[in-house]
Structures are given as C-alpha cells and as structure tokens.
Image: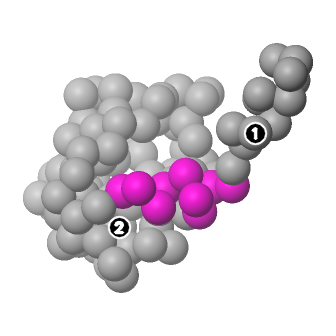
Amino acid sequence: MTWQDEYRKRLTDAEHAVSVVRSGMRVFLHGAAATPIELIDALLRRSPQLENVEITHIHTEGDAPYTRPEFQGHFRLNALFMGANVRKAVNEGRG
C-alpha cells in the first residue's frame, strides 16, 4: 500500500470529524489564516445536541459565529487573544 492509499483511507467529511465532540468538551481551533471554517460550520450544525463546549483559540480571523447569543449554553469562548471578532461576545459575558 502506498502512502497515497493510506492518506485516502483517512479522509473524512466535516460532519464526521466533529461527531466526536461531546457536551462539556474543550475544542481548540487553529487560528489566523488556518481557521477551520468548514469544521466550525459543522460544529454549529450540531449545537442542538451540545452543551457547554469550550472553544479555545489564540486568534481567529473572520467571523466567530460560535460567539453569537443564539449559541449561548452550547459554546463558550476561551480566547487566549481577544481580537475584534470576539470582543463583543467577551464583553457580554459569552467568553
């Protein structure tokens, strides 16, 4: 078996990748230009099934939809650097 075959066996979609997340877990998001938008979107689609998931990151770019009021109780932000995209949520007590 080649390394390419081994790689193909490990590929999965975003829904399957976030299916391991359970209530009460901590999820670390890579930041800056490598913020995993597709994985975040898949995680948000699971929000009705999740409670108190801590999302930790250093600095993300773009929108941070997991900080919106409608996700309160499902996700809580633990920002190691507070950028403009999460400042309002932190000031309002969601992070």
Q: Position of residue 65 (x, y in %)?
A: 45, 61
In the rendered view, does 26 fall on the left or right side of 92? Answer: right
Which of the two labelled residues, at mark 1 and mark 2, occupies the earlier sequence position?
A: 1
Mark 1 → mark 2, Cα distance in angstroms = 36 Å
Is residue 41 something that shows in the picture? no
The part of the chain drawn in magenta is: 13-21
> Residue tagged by mark 2?
68
Of the pair 35 and 18, the residue shown nearer to us? 18
Residue sitting farthest toward the top: 3
* The N terminus - image quarter: top right
In the rendered view, does 3 fall on the left or right side of 24? Answer: right
Q: Residue at x 47, y 30 (%)?
A: 30
Q: Residue at x 21, y 41 (%)?
A: 78
Q: Residue at x 46, y 67 (%)?
A: 44
Q: Residue at x 40, y 29 (%)?
A: 59
Task: Give yes or no for residue 55 being in the magenta stretch.
Answer: no
Residue sitting farthest toward the front: 1
Is residue 15 something that shows in the picture? yes
Task: Give yes or no for residue 20 being in the magenta stretch.
Answer: yes
Q: Tell me the crowding category of disc 1: few under 14, some 14 to 19, or many 20 or more residues within 10 angstroms, Cα based.
A: few
Of the pair 51 and 58, the residue shown nearer to us? 51
Looking at the rendered image, the disc whose residue lies closer to the viewer, 1 or 2, is 1
Q: Position of residue 87 (x, y in %)?
A: 28, 46
The residue under label 2 is which amino acid type? Arg
> Residue tagged by mark 1?
9
Q: Secondary structure at mark 1?
A: helix
